[in-house]
Structures are given as C-alpha cells and as structure tokens.
Amino acid sequence: MAEDQTKPVKKTQPTPFFQSMQREMNQFIDRFRGHPMSSPGDFFEALGAPAFPAIDVVETDDALEITAEIPGVDEDDLDISIANNALVLKGEKSSEHEDKEQDFHLVERRYGSFRRQLPLGFTPEGGAVNATFKNGVLKLKIAKPEGSSEPVQKIKISKS
C-alpha cells in the first residue's frame, strides 16, 4: 500500500501591498455606487480629482467675475462661448517631451480635451464680456444686463 506523499499546503496571509491595493479598489468601486453621473465633472469627482479646469466664480452687483486655471493650454486651443444663458469653456491640452541619450530614447505625449459649462442665469448684452488669458489663467468679467438681478427671498426655517 502506497503512503500518501502529499503535504498540507501552508496558507499565507496576503502581503500588506495586496491588502492595501484591495482596500483602494473597494473604495474606488464604492465611489461609483449610488452616484449617477450627470456630467463629466461627476466622473472626476468620483475619482477624487477635481474637474478640469478649476474655476472660481465671484458675483458682484453688476457682473460675474470668473477665473479658470488652464495650465499648459495655448490661447489658440481655447473656445469660449455663451449660449442658452450658459458660459461654455472648451479646449484641448497637448504636450510632448522627448529625451535622447546614448543608451535610451524616451518620448512622452499627453493629450486631452475638456469642456465646462456654467449656468449664468442671463445672456449678456453684446460687448459686455471682457476676457484675458495670461500664464494659464483665464479671467472673464461678464456684465449683467439691466433687470437681470432678482430680489432675494429669505426662507425662515421653522423648528418642528
């Protein structure tokens, strides 16, 4: 009669690297559950990254002042328009880097386009928009037309 030559297999615990990777993958998947994607910005927010470009909006009595950070984009690659009471910023970013040495040749390319739409609540009159672009920062000042400001109605919260 032959002896059973098999030895029990020793189970090992996952390494910290794989535990960490599993935890991050679970968190990544959980970010998408229960969050319907209504805009491209929602996708980036679910990833934990801000939508591109980052935008600041300041409202004054007579204008909206908008600042958008768009590093690495040329002015010629920007398309700025206003349609249906909304500001639309579109652009394309591309860069290429090449290193040649005796032992290696490295080429890196990055391409991507973006589109951001901001509701204004009004359509400015012709010539009422001032735009400047310098060092990757777009600044817009959009004058509000007469009568575009509605009175603010405060809502009182009752304690139940």
Image (cartoon, rainbow, N blue to C red):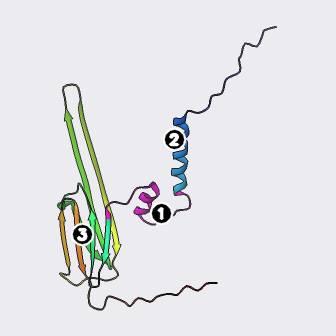
Q: Amino acid at mark 1?
A: Met
| Residue 121 vertical position relative to residue 108 in the rendered view, above or below | below
Query: 84 left or right of 37?
Result: left
Q: Residues within 10 Å of mark 3 (few under 14, many from 20)?
A: few
Q: Earlier in the sequence, mark 3 or mark 1?
A: 1
Crowd band around label 2 with a 10 angstrom C-alpha radius: few (<14), some (14–19), many (20+):
few
| Labels 3 and 2: the sequence-earlier one | 2
State how far apart marks 3 and 2 are (Cα): 41 Å
Q: Secondary structure at mark 3?
A: strand
Give how far across and how far down residue 160 sits, in percent.
64, 84
- Which residue matches tag 3? 80
Give SS at disc 1.
loop
Q: Is residue 73 left or right of residue 27?
A: left
> Which residue has dot 2 on it?
21
| Between marks 3 and 2 in the image, the one whose residue lies nearer the viewer | 2
* Numbered range of the magenta stretch: 32-54
The part of the image, by quadrant, that contains residue 138 is bottom left
Which callout, 1 or 2, points to the residue nearer the camera?
A: 2
As drawn, the label of residue 37 is: 1
The disc placed on residue 45 is none
Query: In this rendering, would 45 be left or right of 69?
Result: right
Numbered disc 2: secondary structure: helix
Q: Earlier in the sequence, mark 1 or mark 2?
A: 2
The residue depicted at 46 percent of the width and 66 percent of the height is 38
Residue 152: which quarter of the image?
A: bottom left
The residue at the point 28 percent across, 50 percent down is 111
Question: At label 2, which amino acid type do we have?
Answer: Met
Q: Residue at x 30, y 54 (%)?
A: 112
